[in-house]
Amino acid sequence: MNIDETEATAAGQLDHALKLLVSVVKDGLEHGFFDYGVSGEIVNGRRRRLTIKAGKSHQFTIPEEEHKN
């Protein structure tokens, strides 16, 4: 699955990350075998880095105003 950087910025990093997470879970259920990992950490002050590992890793840096809602 490719990440469209422009789409991610316009829609917000958190929304894009959640859509990707739903998509990879649905793909895994369709194939029947899958192993995923999700991790989070604080970076650059109050921003959060969310990493979704699903075959390959996808990272999202989420600004404070997005994760406070």
Image: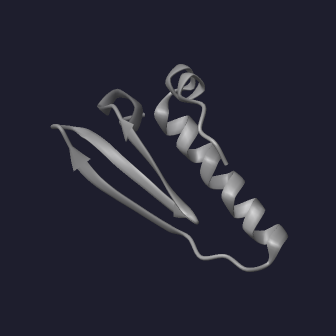
Pick the residue in front: 59 or 64: 59
Relative placement, left or right, of 20 versus 59 is: right
- Snapshot quadrant of residue 64: top left
Residue at the location (50% across, 28% down)? 12
- Snapshot quadrant of residue 3: top right
Rendered position, 62 above or below 24 = above
Q: Picture coordinates of residue 14 (x, y %)?
A: 49, 38
Q: Picture coordinates of residue 46 (x, y %)?
A: 21, 38
Relative placement, left or right, of 28 versus 19 is: right
How many labels, in total?
A: 0
Residue pushed farthest right? 30
Residue at the location (67% across, 76% down)? 34
Q: Picture coordinates of residue 39 (x, y %)?
A: 39, 62
Relative placement, left or right, of 63 versus 11 is: left
Q: Quadrant of the C terminus?
A: top left
Pick the residue in front: 5 or 62: 5
Q: Picture coordinates of residue 36 (x, y %)?
A: 56, 70
Residue at the location (53% across, 28% down)? 5
Rendered position, 63 above or below 51 = above
Pick the residue in front: 3 or 19: 3
Residue pushed farthest left? 45
